[in-house]
Image: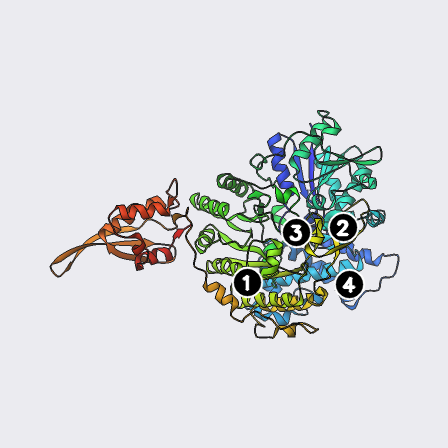
């Protein structure tokens, strides 16, 4: 039986482990295969940013064989090396939430040595005013780490980054030559530390196969350096590489030199390929019957995909297993500029997938031709919540990031109901499409289940271009959905794009005006502009002529093939807009700059917007949610106390009732005729989330109301009683 070591090479995230190895380990558990995992990224960071690690870093600079001309900032850090060495371990402990009282010393601004990253701190009073002591201290400690990172990058290793390593080498690496050149250079302090840690893992676990997860270009070089070390010191161990980078970039791999560092490269979902590999290594199947796997045979790269087995169904992949990972040692750093980026960097999030692939799968800029997008397979709400409970039990962490391409509204609804029914305490966020099925009532339900944030693609904020993208949404629809989330207390982040094929200067400025109004009206709280990138597996990359662009490179050299160069003859000069879009958005996210003319954000002349100043306001005003034909009714609150009584009106005695409700914040009541009260008293157990077996259809509610001879339900639905119930937890979903 093979023993497996699953590795995430440096670097991905500081605050939480990337989930790929946890997913594979969970699957291997179902097979009874012994496996262990490690996140070398966080372990290298902790080894480097320690008293001993910093001492070695500064010593390495002193022992450098050639003179290094340091910038004034790096020179300052070097001369403050004793202060950095003395403070590093308390700061790391603080960022691990193990030393909270240090916050007071950090906030005093007399404890930490400060370099260039602190130069704008005095201008951040607007942010600090809303921060508590702990958050302010975490931000200052983050700047302190970034200063050290800048020094390390300048003086020791130019490829260093806290969430990436040698990313430039992995990005658009159509040829293997440059990577090979760098791999043959002497080890840096970072790779020395990485190899030391890897050697300890090999000694402790004694695996026969090592799997390297490479989700991003920024940990490709680290993976290859791991492979290089293993080939030299453990030549009998088989090395497998997979992950998001391989899935998108290496589908045409043909350079045999790659396999001087690896034995196998697997594509797409890793469960089935790894299972066939294990069987091959156990001599239970021939090489030809592997699944989606590259290997070198007779000095040629061969793609083996003869396995007849289908991919492992999502329900059979097992629960992600985070054991072996240093869950309590990750760092919570603070990004104060962008609220969504802060979620990425602050807090420990269990990452979980609700569904494989994307239920929409049409966006023309997306890799919809690839398996991880096109093969949609949702899990059931019950199974998802089973996995949530198991992960909470194992990690003692109740924060979840659902990492779907776009979480389907119906599945999110069912998951939210199941979370509430099981009385789970969960905090979660995810990515969605701004589609109309995300009604105001659904937003309230998601909030009640623990949702704190939603991110989704507004992209170009132009209806023409959105249609060209096949996003299936309009700007107005995005505004209404975002407004529903915001009213429910859910933060909304928008992915924004510029430079899409044929996008004109006018459309760019009009998109910015849309974004300005969305922030001004308070329906967006976070956003990020990125430049359109043409990829070889997207509809644009597969058929550029259909989008009026031309592919102009790069030439394929046997290694990566994904990011494409293109010419956009009908579009604007998109280089002119990047900085202005960034600056304006920075201000809008902080609630300022709305009255500044759009032209002032740019260094060159730009068109005047054609968007009416109240466009978004008008769109939001149209946000009446229509009731779907198959809608059902849900009650979020507790059952009311009911008291029946009589009152005299002249000679008549009227029987009334009072329904008294208790919720977490206040008590409230409604008075109504006894017959209606009796109907509601019997209704609430049927619709209360904690009690019902099957949800009650809205149409059935109408029918039962009128069958009880209570009059027109349509008329009842316009009464103050109905309005008050709707305001306090009666949802139509």
> From the viewer's perspective, is the residue at label 3 or at label 4 nearer?
3
- Furthest toward the left, the residue is 651
Tell me which numbered mark, 3 or 4, is placed earlier along the sequence: 3
- At a point 63% along the width and 37% down the height, the residue shown is 25
Q: Check whether the beta carbons of the residues at disc 1 and disc 4 lie within 8 A of each other.
A: no
CA–CA distance between discs 1 and 4? 39 Å
Q: Within 10 Å of the Cα at label 4, are there few (<14), some (14-19), or many (20+) other Cα atoms?
A: some
In the depicted view, which residue is nearer to us: 284 or 100?
A: 284
- The residues tagged by marks 1 and 2 sit, at their Cα atoms, a distance apart of 33 Å
Kindly identify which residue carries mark 4: 78
Dividing the picture into quadrants, the one containing residue 391 is: top right
**How far across and down, in percent of the image, does residue 502 sit?**
68, 61
Residue that label 2 marks: 170
Tally the marks. Answer: 4
**How many neighbours does mark 2 have within 10 angstroms: few (below 14), some (14-19), or many (20 or more)?**
many
Marks 4, 2: nearer the viewer: 2
In the image, farthest residue toward the top: 284
**Helix, strand or loop for disc 3:** loop
Residue 27, compared with residue 647, is above or below; it is above
Q: N-terminal of the two: label 4 or label 2? A: 4
């Amino acid at each position: 039986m093979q023993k497996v070591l699953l590795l995430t090479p440096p670097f991905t995230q500081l605050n939480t482990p990337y989930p790929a190895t946890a997913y594979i380990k969970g699957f291997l558990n179902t097979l009874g295969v012994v496996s262990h995992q490690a996140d070398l990224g966080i372990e290298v960071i902790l080894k480097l940013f320690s008293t001993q690690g910093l001492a070695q870093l500064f010593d390495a600079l002193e022992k450098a064989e050639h003179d290094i001309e340091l910038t004034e900032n790096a020179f300052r850090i070097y001369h403050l090396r004793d202060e950095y060495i003395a403070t590093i371990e308390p700061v790391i402990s603080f960022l691990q939430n193990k030393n909270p009282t240090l916050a007071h010393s950090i906030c005093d601004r007399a404890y930490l040595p400060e370099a260039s990253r602190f130069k704008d701190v005095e201008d951040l009073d607007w942010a600090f005013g809303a921060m508590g002591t702990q958050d302010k201290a975490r931000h200052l400690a983050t700047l302190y780490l970034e200063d050290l990172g800048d020094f390390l990058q300048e003086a020791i290793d130019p490829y260093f980054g806290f969430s990436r390593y040698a990313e430039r080498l992995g990005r658009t690496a159509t040829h293997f030559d440059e990577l090979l050149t760098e791999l043959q250079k002497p080890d840096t302090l970072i790779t020395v530390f990485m190899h030391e840690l890897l050697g300890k893992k090999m000694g402790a676990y004694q695996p026969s196969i090592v799997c390297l997860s490479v989700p991003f270009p920024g940990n490709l070089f680290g993976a290859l350096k791991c492979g290089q070390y293993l080939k030299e010191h453990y030549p009998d161990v088989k090395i497998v590489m997979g992950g998001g980078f391989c899935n998108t970039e290496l589908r045409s791999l043909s350079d045999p030199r790659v396999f001087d560092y690896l034995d196998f490269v697997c594509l797409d979902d890793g469960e089935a390929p790894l299972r066939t590999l294990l069987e091959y290594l156990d001599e239970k199947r021939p090489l030809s019957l592997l699944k989606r796997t590259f290997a070198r045979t007779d000095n040629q790269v061969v793609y083996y995909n003869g396995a007849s087995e289908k991919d492992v169904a999502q329900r059979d992949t097992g629960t992600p297993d985070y054991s072996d990972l240093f869950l309590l040692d990750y760092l919570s750093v603070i990004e104060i500029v962008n609220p969504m980026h802060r979620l990425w960097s602050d807090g420990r999030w269990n990452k979980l997938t609700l569904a494989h692939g994307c239920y929409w799968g049409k966006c023309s800029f997306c890799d919809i031709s690839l398996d991880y997008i096109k093969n949609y397979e949702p899990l059931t709400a019950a199974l998802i919540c089973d996995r949530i409970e198991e992960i909470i039990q194992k990690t003692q962490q109740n924060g979840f990031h659902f990492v779907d391409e776009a979480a389907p509204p119906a599945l999110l609804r069912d998951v939210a109901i199941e979370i509430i029914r099981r009385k789970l305490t969960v905090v979660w966020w995810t990515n969605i499409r701004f589609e109309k099925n995300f009604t105001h009532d659904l937003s309230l339900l998601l909030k009640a289940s623990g949702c704190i944030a939603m991110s989704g693609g507004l992209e170009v904020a132009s209806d023409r271009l959105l249609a060209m993208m096949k996003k299936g949404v309009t700007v107005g629809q995005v505004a209404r959905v975002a407004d529903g989330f915001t009213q429910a207390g859910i933060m909304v982040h928008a992915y924004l794009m510029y430079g899409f094929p044929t996008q004109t200067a006018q459309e760019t400025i009009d998109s910015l005006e849309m974004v300005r109004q969305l922030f001004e009206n308070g329906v967006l709280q976070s956003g990020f502009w990125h430049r359109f990138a043409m990829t070889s597996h997207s509809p644009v990359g597969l058929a550029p002529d259909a989008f009026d662009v031309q592919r102009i490179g790069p030439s394929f050299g046997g290694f990566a093939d994904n990011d494409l160069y293109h010419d956009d003859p009908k579009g604007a000069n998109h280089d002119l807009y990047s900085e202005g879009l960034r600056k304006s958005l920075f201000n809008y996210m902080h609630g300022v700059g709305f009255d500044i003319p759009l032209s002032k954000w740019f260094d060159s002349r730009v068109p005047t917007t054609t968007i009416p100043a109240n466009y978004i306001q008008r769109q939001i005003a149209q946000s009446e949610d229509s009731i779907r034909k198959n809608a059902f009714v849900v009650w979020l609150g507790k059952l009311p106390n009911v008291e029946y009584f009589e009152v005299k009106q002249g000679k008549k005695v009227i029987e009334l009732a009072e329904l008294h409700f208790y919720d977490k914040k206040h008590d409230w009541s409604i008075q109504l005729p006894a017959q209606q009260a009796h109907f509601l008293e019997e209704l609430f157990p049927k619709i209360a989330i904690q009690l019902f077996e099957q949800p009650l259809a809205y149409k059935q509610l109408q029918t039962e109301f009128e069958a009880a001879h209570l009059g027109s339900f349509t008329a009842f639905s316009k009464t103050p009683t109905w309005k008050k119930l709707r305001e306090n937890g009666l949802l139509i979903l």
